[in-house]
Amino acid sequence: MDTYADTKNRILFLLEQKQMSIYALAMKSGVSASTIKSILYGKSKNPGVVTIKLLCDGFGISLYDFFNTEVFRSRELENI
């Protein structure tokens, strides 16, 4: 997997864990539902850190909590 897929899957996991809809996350985070859908459905493959931070605020977690998973801890540097 790549970082985009890991980020998308983390958002999907948190939506399920918090029992939130995309619309509810949009309302709590201030990120439009269309932007969230663009991330989740692959139209936007490079969400910015500010967007991720706002989504974290909507989930009630920190950026550290978002990225502090085995998947992100074990990621190797990506060649760009």
Image: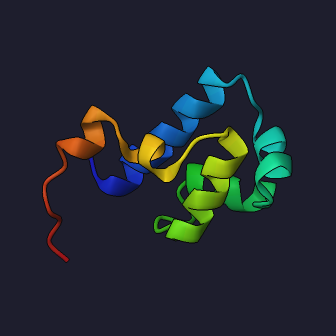
In the image, 9 versus 41, the foreground residue is 9
Q: Position of residue 14 (x, y in %)?
A: 57, 32
Q: Is residue 51 above or below residue 72?
A: below
Q: Is residue 53 left or right of residue 64?
A: right
How many labels, in total? 0
Look at the image and tell me in which quarter the N terminus lies. Answer: top left
| 17 up-or-down from 72: above or below | above
x then y, percent, for residue 71? 27, 38
Q: Is residue 17 above or below residue 41?
A: above
Image quarter for residue 33?
A: bottom right
The percent coordinates of residue 58 (x first, y second) are 72, 46
Quadrant for residue 51, please give it: bottom right
Q: Residue furthest bottom?
A: 80
Tell me: 14 left or right of 6: right
- Residue at screen point 56% across, 58% down: 52
Q: Is residue 18 above or below residue 23?
A: above
Q: Which colour assignment does the render follow?
A: rainbow
Q: Nearer the viewer, residue 62 or 49?
A: 62
Question: Which residue: 61% across, 49% down?
Answer: 56
User: Left or right of 78: which side holds 36?
Assistant: right
Q: Is residue 51 left or right of residue 29?
A: left
For the C terminus, which image quadrant? bottom left
